[in-house]
Amino acid sequence: MRPTRLPLHALLLLIALLAVQSLAAPTFAQAQLYQVPGQNSPTTKEQVPLYVPQDDKVIGRVSIPDERLGVLVQPEGREWREWRTHTLRLAIGGLAIGMTAVLAIFFLYRGTIRIHGGKSGRLVLRFNGLDRFAHWTTAVSFLTMALTGVIMTFGRPLLIPLIGHQAFTPLAEYAKSIHNFVSVPFVVGLLMIMALWLRDNIPEKADWTWIRTAGGLFSKAGGHHPEAGRFNAGQKLVFWSIVLGGIGMAATGYLLMVPFAFTGIGGMQIMHVIHGLLAAGLIAAVIGHIYIGTIGMEGAFDAMGCGEVDENWAMEHHRRWYQEQMRKGYVEGRQPAE
Amino acid sequence: MARMKFLCDAERCIECNACVTACKNEHEVPWGINRRRLVTLNDGKPGERSISMACMHCNDPPCAAVCPVDCFLQTADGVVLHSKDLCIGCGYCFYACPFGAPQYPRTTDFGSRGKMDKCTFCAGGPEPDGSVEEYQKYGANRLAEGKLPLCAEMCSTRALMGGDGAVLADIYQERSLRRGYGSGAPGWSTAYGRNDRGSPFAPGGPGTGGA
């Protein structure tokens, strides 16, 4: 028996069709929806990056005038968010509370440092009107900006639960405006302080002795008091902290106030971090400064309060300066030609 | 409840800026504010991609976390809105946002920042839906009318899509399958192979990993 086979003409047609098909194969392949994998196509699931975590900015081109919007993604915002919501509050709160705790313990240990020998009743001019104006301008400006800054930093977790959103927004708005404008008298006061007191705050050898003995803070009352000129080493530390820190605050602050005038978004975030760090340090330093100038030491506040200090206080704490004042004839009741 | 999302298919985007224009027009966005923008990467080089970017309406939005006056709210659909009445224009949301969504007019002292403005997913703001105050402050509220964001509706190539995340995921998966990316996870580097992207007139081409 002959096996079943296709009629000859059908077979020839089939061969012709197959030939045409193979010739036209490349064109047909390109028209297919499902594509042929090439040499570079992934072969396993692991080769296909589902999500590549970005650590750096992705910047492209935009056709609008604002070229800053060419930054497609800035992952550094994640780190900045952590700083702003968590670390900054820890820094400011921690340093302020820590300093207060240390001072409280010190006060319980030492109490108010009394003038050895009591007040004499005679006065010596320590700071004239200009000195005191410079100091109080800087001081009040600083405290205002510290308070408004703390409102903006801590207001959301601490104040909104107390006064609500509707009341807190005007408070924060005013805080922001006051913070920006009070920067001006602060800088003016800072410049005055530098002009008036820079010369007397240059570090010298006696300062090292003062620091090593911690200014006599821990020696018993009436014990040896290290020598000091117009400003002792502790005051010089405060001076340089405020001056250098204040310049840093002003510089970062003004850059923050004119956003993106000189920096990109990374720069603005860095400015904010520095501004916050300096604020934390300065607030702690000023708490210490206020302590020693008020309850920490008897007779200290008079220097800035009215400008004249008790003679015994001057002799005990700033002997070299007191002796200079005597030589120049500035001591009340001791002036030869009065 | 739908979780609203945006998805921009960088391989379909032709940089026509219809989304930008649609948003600007629909919400009467003032000069200088760019709620939606088109960013082109590798402009002029092989592998040029354009992508439309506005607010991504994140979960755990960084903008909401850093706001000092807590003026942000997130709707049940996942849309991140904010209140211009509470905003003090401090600028923190822009520092925190990875996508640069918040924009500010140049007003207030020192011309620094006014109230923040950003993409609202065409869902307006805290004011009553469709009210005059809402339109003046935040623009049109299309979601309240049952419509989707206009940028996605206007996209000429259906590159930008906005709406229910589940629906978008289905579209995304179908496109991946049709493009032949194996396990269905297109990344920009797998589009035409990392090294050879063909010529501008025959992207890919035979033998380059996809036609």
Image (cartoon, coloured by chain):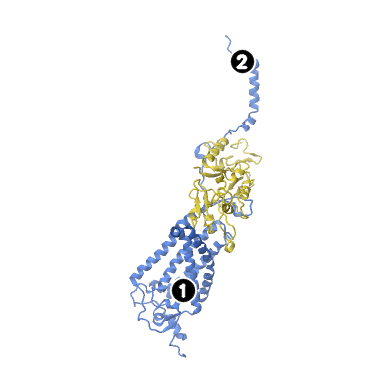
Chain colours: A blue, B yellow
Q: CA distance from mark 2 to mark 1?
A: 112 Å
Tell which tag, 2 or 1, sits nearer the viewer.
2
The residue to which callout 1 is attached is A203
Near mark 2 (Cα within 10 A), the count class, few <14, some 14-19 or many ≥20, is few
Task: Specify the quadrant of the image occupied by residue A317.
Answer: bottom left
* Depicted A198 relative to depicted B193: above or below: below
| Residue at mark 2: chain | A
> Residue at the location (39% across, 66% down)?
A100
Query: Whole-percent x and y of residue B121?
Result: 55, 47
Which residue type carries mark 1?
A: Pro
Query: Whole-percent x and y of residue A230?
Result: 45, 78
Element at label 1:
loop
Residue A199 seen: no
A170, A96: nearer the viewer: A170
Which residue type carries mark 2?
A: Leu
Query: Whole-percent x and y of residue A333?
Result: 43, 87
Task: Specify the quadrant of the image occupied by residue A14.
Answer: top right
Q: Are marks 2 and 1 in contact (CB under 8 Å)?
A: no
The residue to which callout 2 is attached is A6
Q: Earlier in the sequence, mark 2 or mark 1?
A: 2
**Quadrant the N terminus of chain A occupies:** top right
